[in-house]
Image (cartoon, grey):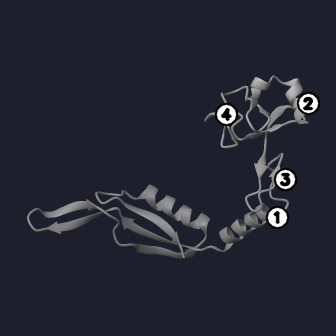
Amino acid sequence: LQSTINNSKDKNTMAKNNNIPKCNQCDSFSVNGIYCHESGCPNEDKKYNHDTESWESVYTCFECGCEYDNPESAGECCGFIQEEEEEEEEEEETQLYDVFVRSWWIWEDTKFNGRVKVAGPGEKTYTHYGVSLAEAKAICKEYNESHNPGELSIKSEFEAQ
């Protein structure tokens, strides 16, 4: 295969040590044996396929490092992606949240200036306990749209239990 490529391509277009043709989109080069494209090159995240003589997208499984041609098949080797999605769905269904109201400014007493407003989260006042994510978002949205945050920027938020 190497001799076929060397015979069919001009040797000046081959990246040193990798037998990969120079990229037609950027001034690619090899650093310590690692083939590199310029930043922003459309072929930056692609690999050269010698059979088709083109740059093709390659997707890598985060769990085992296997490479695939399309994103749908990535992770099928070890089931990593499917397990991760199932865990996220279960977490969303079982995770409960507490809703609270607090200010983002507080009054601070000073020796010479009296009271001054300083940035800092105020004390939390809980309004709802053990609600789902969708309910928590709806409660916060309703509160924040119907209440004036005022001088201390009082707003509704939520946190996981």
The one of 14 and 134 positioned closer to us in this rendering:
14
* Amino acid residing under circle 1: Gly
How far apart marks 2 and 3 lie (CA) works out to: 31 Å
How far apart marks 4 and 2 lie (CA) works out to: 21 Å
Which residue is drawn at the image coordinates 67% and 33% (left, top)?
29
- Nearer to us of marks 1 and 2 is 2
Q: Is residue 123 left or right of residue 68?
A: left
- Nearer to us of marks 2 and 3 is 2
Residue occupied by mark 2: 4
How far apart marks 1 and 3 lie (CA) works out to: 10 Å
Q: Position of residue 93 (x, y in %)?
A: 68, 70
> Mark 1, residues whose alpha carbon is within 10 Å: few (<14), some, or many (≥20)?
few
Q: Quadrant of residue 136?
A: bottom right
> Mark 4, residues whose alpha carbon is within 10 Å: few (<14), some, or many (≥20)?
some
- State which tag comes first along the sequence, 3 or 4: 4
Mark 2 lies on a secondary structure that is helix
Q: Which mark is residue 79?
A: 1
Residue occupied by mark 3: 73
Q: Position of residue 41 (x, y in %)?
A: 66, 32
